[in-house]
Structures are given as C-alpha cells and as structure tokens.
C-alpha cells in the first residue's frame, strides 16, 4: 500500500515572506487611508459642525453616516471577495472613497457633508472587509502574528497622526483639508496594489444575491436611523418610533428568509453560524462594537468641550490609547505566532477593556489629564489584544472558499454594534448635555440676569467653548464632562457581555496553511494512488 501525502506537506501555494511584504505594503496603505478617514476628522468635528451651523444631532450623524454605509455594505464586499478579483475590488473601494472625500471637502452644508460621508463609508466598508480577507488569503493563521506588528503599526500611525494632522489642518488651512489629505494616500495605495498584489482568481459561477443585499442594507439602515434619531427628533415611545421598529424587524426578517431559503449564493451564508467560534465571535464583536466605538468616539468632544483643548491638543491625548493598543497587538501577535495559543490573550484583553471602560466611567470635567491618559492606555491594551485576535480565531476555523463571507461577518457585526453604540450613546450624551445646560443656565440667570443675552445658545448645539463667558463656559464644561463619564458607564455592561462570549469560545490550534485540512485533503486525495 502506498502512503498518501500528508496534509502538512501541502502548503497550498502560500507566498514567500518577501512576496507577502510587497503585497502587504499596498494593503497597509489602503488600510491606513480607511482608518485615517475617521481619525483625521475626529478632532475637527466640533469646528466643522460649528462652521456649518450644525447641531449635536448633526455631529452624531457625520460619524454615523460613514458607519452606516460601511456597516451595511461590509458583508456585500466580503461576498464579492469570494466571487471576483480581490485586487480589483480593493482598488474600486479606493476610488469610491476618494470620490466621497472630494464631495466632503467641498461640502457647503451639513446635509451635503453627511451625504458625502455616506459615499466615503461605502469605500471604507470595502477596504475594511477586503484587506483582512486578502491577508488571510496570503498568510496562514499561525504565521499571521509575524505580520501583526505591521498592521498594528499602521493602525497606530493612522490613529495618532490622524487627530494630530487633522487638528493642525483645522488650526491652519481649515477643516476642508481633512478630507483632501487622504486623496494622495489613496492614489498611492492604488498604484502600489496594481504593481505588487498578485492573487489567483478562482473561476466559479457567479450568482449575486441582489434581493438579499437590498433587504440587508434596508434593515440595518432603518434600525440605525431609529437608534440615531430616537429621543431627539421623536420620542422613544411614539408612532414614528413604533413604525421604524416594525419596519426594521420586517425587513430584517425578510432578509433572513431570503438568505436561508431563496438565495442561491447568499450574501451572509447562514450555514456559517453552525460554527461555534464564528457565532460566539459575532456576539462578542457586536458587544465590543457598542462598548468601544460608542464610547471612545466622544472622547475628542470631551477634551475640546470639557477641557477646552484645541483640536491638536485633543489629538495628542489619543496617543495614550493607541500606545497601549500598539504594544499589546504586537506583543500578542508575536507570542501567538510562536506558540499557537491565542484564547488567553482574548480573555485577558477583554478583562483590560472592562477595566479601562470602568475607569473612564469615573471621569468628569475636573479629572486630571494624566489620570484620563492612564485610563485610556488600559483600554488600549485590552483592545490591542482583542480585536485582531478575534478575527484570527474565526479565520482559523472557516474554509478559504468562505474566507470573504466569514471575515466580513465579524467585521459587519462589529461595525453594526459600533454604529448602534455611536448613535445610541450619542443620543444619551446629547440628551444629558441639553438637560444639564438647560438647568445650569436657568440657575445662572436667577443669580446673574445680566447674562440673558449671552444665553441665547440652543442647548442642543455644539458651541465654541472659548467664546463663551466664564460662568456659561463652566456650565458647558461640567455638562460635557459628566455626560462623557456617564456614556462609559452605559457601555460597561456590553463589554462584560463580550467577555462572557469570549470565555465560551473553544480554543482550536492555529493551522499552518492558508487552507483548512479538509480542503487540502480534497486536493491531494484525487492524486493519491489507490491501494
């Protein structure tokens, strides 16, 4: 009897280290420009909203619009990655992102800006989903830690440089350049990908699930609109709220029915959820998205409104969180690559996330900056050990043929949680600030009626703190400080829920090939001589 070739001997056509680095350079540029699109405007948003005469609701929607488009389209991009040329898809996402950036840069009003952010979000959704898929197609789960340092460095660079560059641009040439600044990077990424990325295109029958995609986007959009505007444009208990909830449930149920029973090649194959790791990782991703994105996105507003810092100074504060994230992502990636053991890093990371969010829930307008910085560093350490490794755990268990759909499912639900978190916690923040400012100004006028003319601000607006008289400025600073700590407290139970989900994930040894063992066996079996 002739012995069949072993699975471990078959490397599945993996690329050499040099080839991976060359291709990775373009992917990292694409990832950088996607991350930069949100970080570079984070500290500019108060100035943008004030310049375009927007409100706190408008502030929230500038962020939510991108998250909404990115979230709704992520699984569609992921599915396309299983059907079409991945390089062409990444380049298409870069073009869409660039078009949205141009429109945003020339936006004359909040409405146009929000629309442009939707276009940007379409491109960011593609880049977010596709970069992870392409990397998974090139590098085995066991070796991915070898390259996580590069990914962590890009994340750190975008997160730190974005707010700093954005702050400098706002303070010098104006906020519109925050949108133009990413265009050269996008163009460079396009060219580098064209020259370096070489992936085999798997020829297969293409059946696009248009109905499922339409219903999926519709259900997610209606849900996020309800969460974003509830309690502000209409009461939570109202006919408008009820109609939106019913519409979201009906459309989402229709999407699930189409994906399960109608679509030949569904956008989100429901069979993937039979995998325990993917299901638990999805639950954890939703909860992490709510806790992380929903709370941290408003830290910049805290620094500028509660601490009266400039956009540049607020950008410097982000170094605390990113520093912790960079250290833990590189360290955990290297050790996981060397040992193949990953669950302890997920659990430890979630414990640190809970601790960081708990500490940040105690901040207010009087909290010293050094203390807030330490709290942010703790949260960063947790996020660095959690986010990439959660995706790694999923990619380690799913087949290469489903890599696009499986990876994008995790990214989709994390973005969905983030979008809901940003909208819901933004509504909580706006409501609490408005109430605190209203009561504070009423008390001030009873003692100092001479401030009546100065108290003409809408309590729902995002004011320029530096232009307000000292007593009124103190009211706004206190309101933003207390409200920011409160939204971290609201986010804390979601982080605890994510830890519980992670605890139930079963640790599976990291595979050393891009393809799963059953896929490799299927390749070598036909060529094996029969006994």
Image (cartoon, rainbow, N blue to C red):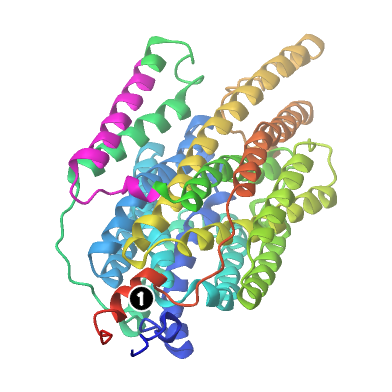
- When the figure is inspected, residue 151 is found, relative to residue 416, above or below; the finding is below
The quarter of the rendered structure image containing the C terminus is bottom left
- Left or right of 515? Residue 339 is right
- When the figure is inspected, residue 402 is found, relative to residue 217, above or below; the finding is below
Residue 213 percent location from the top left of the image:
25, 44
Please, what secondary structure does the residue beneath circle 1 have? helix
- Left or right of 291? Residue 469 is right
Residue 411 percent location from the top left of the image:
45, 52
Residue 296 percent location from the top left of the image:
63, 45
Count all numbered tags in the image, as a single digit. 1
Looking at this view, is 466 or 409 the one in front? 409
| Magenta run includes residue 271 | yes
Picture quadrant where residue 377 is located: bottom right
Looking at this view, is 511 or 200 the one in front? 511
Looking at this view, is 46 or 204 the one in front? 204
Q: Which residues are magenta?
A: 243-272
- When the figure is inspected, residue 238 is found, relative to residue 220, above or below; the finding is above
Q: Is any part of residue 295 visible from this angle?
A: yes
Q: Is any part of residue 184 visible from this angle?
A: no
> Which residue does the image show at 68% across and 60% down from the upper left?
345
Residue where numbered disc 1 is placed: 520
- When the figure is inspected, residue 14 is found, relative to residue 422, above or below; the finding is below
| Magenta run includes residue 265 | yes
Picture quadrant where residue 492 is located: top right
Q: Residues within 10 Å of mark 1 (few under 14, many from 20)?
A: some
Residue 355 percent location from the top left of the image:
76, 45
Most frequent secondary structure within the magenta stretch = helix
């Amino acid at each position: 009897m002739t012995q069949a070739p072993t699975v471990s001997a078959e490397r599945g056509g993996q690329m050499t280290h040099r080839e991976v680095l060359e291709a990775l350079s373009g992917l990292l540029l694409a990832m950088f420009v996607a991350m930069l699109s949100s970080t570079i405007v984070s500290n500019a948003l108060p100035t943008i909203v004030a310049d375009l005469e927007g409100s706190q609701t408008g502030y929230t929607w500038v962020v939510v619009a991108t998250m909404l488009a990115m979230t709704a389209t992520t699984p569609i991009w992921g599915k396309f990655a299983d059907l079409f040329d991945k390089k062409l898809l990444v380049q298409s996402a870069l073009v869409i992102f660039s078009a949205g950036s141009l429109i945003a840069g020339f936006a004359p009003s909040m409405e146009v800006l929000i629309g442009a952010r939707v276009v940007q979000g379409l491109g960011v959704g593609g880049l977010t989903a596709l970069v992870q898929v392409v990397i998974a197609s090139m590098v085995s789960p066991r070796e991915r830690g070898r390259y996580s340092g590069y990914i962590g460095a890009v994340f750190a660079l975008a997160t730190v440089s974005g707010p700093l560059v954005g702050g400098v641009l706002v303070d010098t040439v104006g906020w519109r350049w925050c949108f133009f600044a990413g265009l050269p990077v996008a163009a460079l990424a396009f060219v580098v990908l064209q020259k370096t990325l070489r992936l085999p295109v798997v020829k297969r029958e293409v059946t696009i699930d248009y109905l499922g995609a339409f219903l999926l986007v519709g259900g997610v959009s209606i849900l996020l609109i309800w969460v974003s505007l509830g309690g502000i444009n209409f009461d939570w208990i109202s006919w408008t709220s009820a109609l939106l909830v019913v519409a979201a449930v009906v459309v989402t149920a229709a999407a699930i029915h189409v994906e399960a029973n109608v679509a030949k090649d569904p956008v989100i194959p429901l069979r993937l959820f039979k995998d325990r790791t993917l299901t638990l990782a999805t639950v954890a991703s939703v909860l992490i998205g709510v806790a992380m994105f929903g709370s941290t996105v408003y830290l910049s507003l805290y620094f500028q409104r509660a601490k009266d810092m400039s956009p540049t100074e607020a950008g410097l504060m982000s170094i605390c969180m990113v520093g912790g994230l960079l250290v833990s992502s590189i360290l955990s990636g290297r050790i996981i690559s060397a040992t193949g053991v990953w669950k302890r890093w997920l659990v430890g990371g979630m414990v640190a996330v809970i601790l960081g969010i708990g500490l940040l829930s105690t901040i207010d307008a009087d909290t010293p900056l050094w203390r807030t910085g330490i709290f942010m560093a703790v949260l960063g350490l947790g996020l660095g050990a959690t986010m990439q490794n959660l995706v790694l755990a999923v990619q380690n268990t799913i087949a290469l043929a489903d890599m696009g759909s499986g990876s994008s499912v995790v990214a989709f639900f994390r973005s969905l949680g983030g979008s809901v978190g940003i909208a819901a916690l933004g509504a909580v923040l706006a409501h609490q600030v408005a109430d605190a400012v209203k009561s504070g100004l009423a008390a001030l006028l009873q003692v100092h009626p001479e401030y009546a003319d100065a108290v003409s601000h809408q309590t729902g607006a995002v004011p320029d703190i530096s232009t307000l008289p000292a007593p009124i400025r103190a009211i706004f600073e206190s309101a933003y400080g207390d409200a920011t700590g409160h939204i971290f407290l609201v986010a804390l139970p979601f982080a605890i829920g994510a830890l519980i989900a992670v605890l139930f994930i079963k640790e599976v040894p990291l595979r050393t090939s891009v393809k799963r063992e059953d896929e490799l066996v299927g390749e070598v079996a036909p060529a094996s001589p029969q006994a």
